[in-house]
Amino acid sequence: MKSRGFSLVELVSVLAVVASVGAVLGPSVGQMRGQMRGLSSEGNLATIGQASGMYALDNEGRIFTFTWKGGETYTNLRNGKSFVPQSDGDAASYQVRDILYRGTGRVDGATRISAPLSRLMHRRFSHLVLSDYMNGDPSSHIWADPSDGSLLGWQSNPLEFLTEDNTIPYGDGFPSDGYDLDSDWADFSIRQLWAFSSSYQVVPRAWLFDDRATYVPFEDTPHLYRRVMNDNLFSQRYFSEVVHPSGKVLMHEEFDRDHGPEAFFAYDHAQPAKLMFDGSINTMASGFSRSAVSPLTTPFFQKEYFHLQEWRQVYIPLDRFPLPLSGLFEDEELNMRYRWTAGGLRGTDYNPLLSGSR
């Protein structure tokens, strides 16, 4: 007996059923995929939290940050010559170079690592100190949100910045207006570092004193800090200074990539994963945290300011970074939340009893 194939009507019916099932399951599958990525990112932060605790045990309770100091003598691994950084900021840049020299072997030739003296390394690269302590790859996936496709791509090809069709921020010049247009973003020493950056940001008070405003945020960009005092950055904060470890953020995702459109952490509805000082992970919306406070209204500046001022600013993207939710030129001022906590390490970002940390 001959087997009978599908008729055209039957085939159309089957395809219609498949399409209907796909339409029903599609959003659920996408949501499940986002949840799994979120769990992986939380796992990264949990591991980083364990490593930061081990670092503290081996370093008299200190929070990890740069340890090289201005005015001290160090050895250049490239030529064996001694040098003396003029400031703590320069010392941190040279320490980054030293870490990447050892982690990548790029000591000579056209691809050798340069000291990025035009940028404050504490802002985006403090994690390299912990990576070095862990004897790990400075471009390990542990530093990347699994949904951060750009960083994962740069990590897989750390020399991409040398190619004409690279995807590195400002790697092919400056985009149209609406982006952060600081001229130093195009520097070679900055572009080479994107493969060693992280999706997770360390809060500034982990390396700045609470009662001094050595560095404060720029009013017109969320990506840079400006110096208002001397360049003494060798602050070496301690875990013991944190009054409410379960309610205070240590590191956080710069963008919430797992709950809809990629949102900068400061949007009230954003739910970036956050590593708390007690090692727990917090995924509550940023809007439930305490308001940010301008560092210029700390007690050190009370002669000039007589009350704490809430700190808000517009999110302006870097080239290749996620756009504001309503597009370029968005003028919504966002509360910078746990980036600039009132009271610094003595303050609280989330109510420890309601934070939902785990």
Image: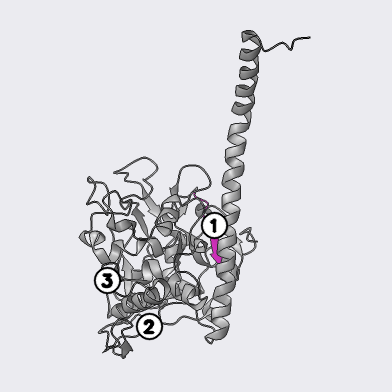
Mark 2 — residue? Answer: 234
The disc placed on residue 273 is 1
In reply to whether residue 3 is colored magenta, the answer given is no
Q: Is residue 211 left or right of residue 304?
A: right
Q: Residue at x 27, y 71 (%)?
A: 109
Q: Give the range drawn in magenta.
A: 270-276
How many marks on residues? 3
Residue 194 on image: x %, y %: 36, 61
Residue 211 on image: x %, y %: 40, 78
Marked residue nearer the N-terminal end (2 or 1): 2
- Inspect the image, locate mark 1, and give the three-letter code of the amino acid beneath it: Ala
Q: Which residue lies furthest to the front in this view?
A: 1
Q: Which quarter of the picture shows residue 123?
A: bottom left
Q: Distance between the residues labelled 2 and 1?
A: 28 Å
- Inspect the image, locate mark 2, and give the three-letter code of the amino acid beneath it: Phe
Q: Residue at x 30, y 57 (%)?
A: 161
**Contact, CB < 8 Å: mark 1 with mark 3?**
no
The disc placed on residue 109 is 3
Residue 259 versus residue 192: which sits nearer the camera? 192
